[in-house]
């Protein structure tokens, strides 16, 4: 709850979790409160490594953020959507195609989904250093809290997970941490994201797809779990299964950058967003994310690790591996707007970015 000195934010009333029995994926639950000892970290590292090799996602609990703090950040997350005028949103629209950055607003209908249907998603993204640009007036009173939230995600969650990832590959514990500085130049960022229901006709044309299957471009994605069921991941048996809501938990997955850094030892995980179940069908889905990327100058190759391990694979792109800055700009500029090549007899589409094949799943 906000204190006497905390600015007022209208309460965001979260939807009730679905009562419909869905085909949920069974994910490992990583309790970060156990990472305080060497024994605990080693046990968690094995658990994380096994989770990423088998499924590619895991839950995090014991992260140190209270239920009250969680509710507060969702109150703040709704401000750029429910409490900001359309004129002001247009003033802060992100120039993704030109700059290769998500900072600012992404309006609805920017990304193509399928069969001529475009997205109904609004984003507001801000670098972990919230002072790098100005923000809409309704959001400005909350910038100190957002800055602290970004710092918490980066130092208390991301760095702890990166240590576990390194230990899981028998690498020095700080191997990935030193590539993800908090004060360095990079684009790790907070994203508030609101998915709105599609028109019935568009739901039919897109098969209920809200965001086509994809991998994330960065190293680690941290999703603050919320009650609207819509996120699915592609399991090893090629079936899409739902992610379950666990209050005050995080959902973590690996992105392209980590796959390239580890030579495929940790693979980017394929996920999508679909129309929620019937008892949640008319509610918007509010998301809070921390998208982590390495420092901009890091080349996405195992050579950047500064250490070797029998568990790390070979460079995916050889000596021509892009830097993080090159990769994020190219993928951000192209995402949802570039022409995709349909693969014969398969429900996938591909594009070539920086010499690497990027696959999208319908």
Image (cartoon, rainbow, N blue to C red):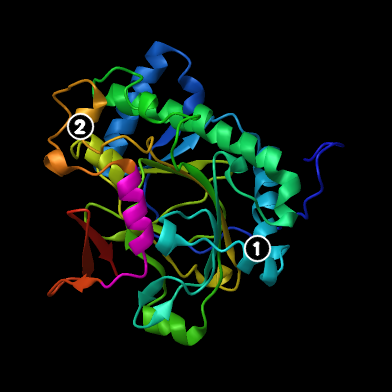
Q: Which residues are magenta?
A: 325-339
- Of 95 and 155, nearer the camera is 95
* Residue 300 falls within the magenta-colored stretch: no
The residue lying furthest to the right in this view is 4
Compared to residue 199, the image places residue 33 above or below, namely above
Q: Quadrant of the N terminus?
A: top right
The label number, if any, that marks residue 302 in the structure image: 2
Q: Is residue 336 magenta?
A: yes
Can I make out residue 238 in this image? Answer: no
State the residue at coordinates (68%, 43%). Answer: 143
Residue visible at 44% across and 12% down? 37
| Residue 20: percent from left, percent from top | 50, 64
| The one of 222 and 25 positioned closer to us in this rendering | 222
Location of residue 158 with respect to 84 vertically, above or below: above
Q: How far is mark 1 from mark 2, CA to CA?
A: 40 Å
- Residue 72, percent from left and from top: 70, 45
Query: Magenta span: helix, strand or loop, mainly?
Result: helix
Q: Is 18 displayed left or right of 262 in the figure?
A: right
């Amino acid at each position: 709850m906000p204190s006497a000195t905390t600015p007022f934010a209208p309460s965001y009333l979260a939807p009730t979790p679905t009562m419909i029995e869905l085909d949920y994926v069974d994910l490992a639950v990583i309790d970060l409160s156990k990472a305080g000892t060497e024994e605990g970290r080693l046990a968690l590292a094995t658990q994380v490594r096994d989770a990423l090799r088998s499924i590619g996602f895991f839950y995090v609990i014991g992260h140190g953020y209270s239920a009250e703090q969680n509710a507060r950040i969702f109150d703040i997350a709704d401000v750029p959507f429910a409490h900001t005028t359309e004129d002001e949103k247009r003033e802060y629209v992100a120039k993704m195609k030109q700059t290769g950055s998500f900072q600012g607003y992404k309006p609805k209908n920017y990304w193509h989904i399928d069969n001529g249907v475009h997205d109904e998603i609004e984003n507001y993204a801000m670098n972990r250093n919230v002072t790098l640009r100005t923000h809409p007036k309704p959001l400005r009173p909350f910038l100190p809290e957002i800055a602290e939230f970004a710092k918490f995600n980066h130092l208390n969650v991301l760095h702890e997970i990166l240590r576990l990832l390194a230990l899981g590959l028998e690498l020095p514990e700080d191997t990935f941490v030193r590539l993800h500085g908090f004060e360095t130049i990079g684009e790790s960022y907070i994203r508030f994201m609101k998915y709105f229901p599609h028109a019935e006709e568009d739901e039919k044309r897109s098969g209920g797809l809200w965001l086509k299957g994809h991998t994330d471009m960065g190293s680690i994605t941290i999703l603050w779990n919320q009650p609207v069921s819509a996120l699915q991941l592609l399991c090893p048996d090629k079936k899409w299964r739902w992610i379950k809501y666990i209050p005050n938990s995080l959902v973590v997955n690996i992105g392209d950058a980590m796959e390239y850094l580890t030579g495929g030892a940790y693979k980017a995980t394929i996920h999508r967003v679909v129309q929620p179940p019937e008892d949640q069908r008319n509610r918007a889905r509010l998301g809070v994310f921390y998208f982590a990327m390495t420092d901009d100058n890091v080349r996405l190759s195992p050579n950047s690790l500064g250490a070797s391990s029998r568990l790390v694979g070979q460079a995916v792109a050889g000596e021509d591996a892009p830097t993080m800055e090159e990769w994020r700009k190219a993928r951000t500029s192209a995402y949802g707007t570039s022409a995709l090549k349909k693969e014969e007899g398969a429900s996938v589409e591909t594009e070539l970015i920086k010499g690497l094949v990027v696959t999208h799943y319908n």
